[in-house]
Image (cartoon, grey):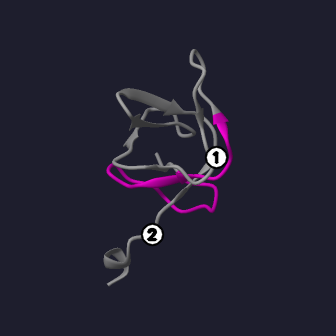
Amino acid sequence: MAVKDSNGNELTDGDSVQVIKDLKVKGSSETLKRGTVLKNIRLTDDEEAIECGHGRNTVVLKSLRWRELMDATRWA
């Protein structure tokens, strides 16, 4: 199972992603703003969903509204 970001890059557990569009959080009045960085993601059984911590909550993002943050050491 390959989970991909909006640019087509494959994601793995522990990656950091950046939100590329404002997202409303269901069941809350909170909104994840564009540019928010979510660190240490976890992959789920669903290919279009990732799980991550935001504040004290765990959020499941179910759309391709994020992109991977490239780490310079990963390309070395």
Q: Is residue 42 above or below residue 70?
A: above
Q: What amino acid is found at the position of numbered circle 1 in the picture?
A: Arg
The CA span between labels 2 and 1 is: 16 Å
What residue span does the magenta drawing correspond to? 4-23
Relative to 63, 47 lies left or right:
left
Counting labels gives 2
Q: Is residue 56 above or below residue 15?
A: above
Q: Where residue 65 sits in the image (x, y, percent)?
A: 64, 46
Q: Is residue 53 above or below residue 64?
A: above
Q: Where residue 41 sits in the image (x, y, percent)?
A: 38, 45
- Identify which residue, 39 or 13, lies in the foreground: 39
The residue positioned farthest toward the bottom in the image shown: 76
Q: Secondary structure at mark 1?
A: loop
Looking at the rendering, in which quadrant would you find the C terminus? bottom left
Badge 1: residue crowd in 10 Å (few <14, some 14–19, many ≥20): some
Snapshot quadrant of residue 52:
top left
Q: Secondary structure at mark 2?
A: loop
Q: What amino acid is found at the position of numbered circle 2 in the picture?
A: Met
Snapshot quadrant of residue 27:
top right
Which of the two discs, 2 and 1, labels the residue nearer the N terminus? 1
Q: Name the residue beneath numbered marker 1.
A: 65
Q: Name the residue beneath numbered marker 2.
A: 70
Query: In the rendered structure, does residue 68 fall within the stretch colored magenta?
Result: no
- Tell me the residue at 33%/48% (across/down): 40
Snapshot quadrant of residue 58:
top left
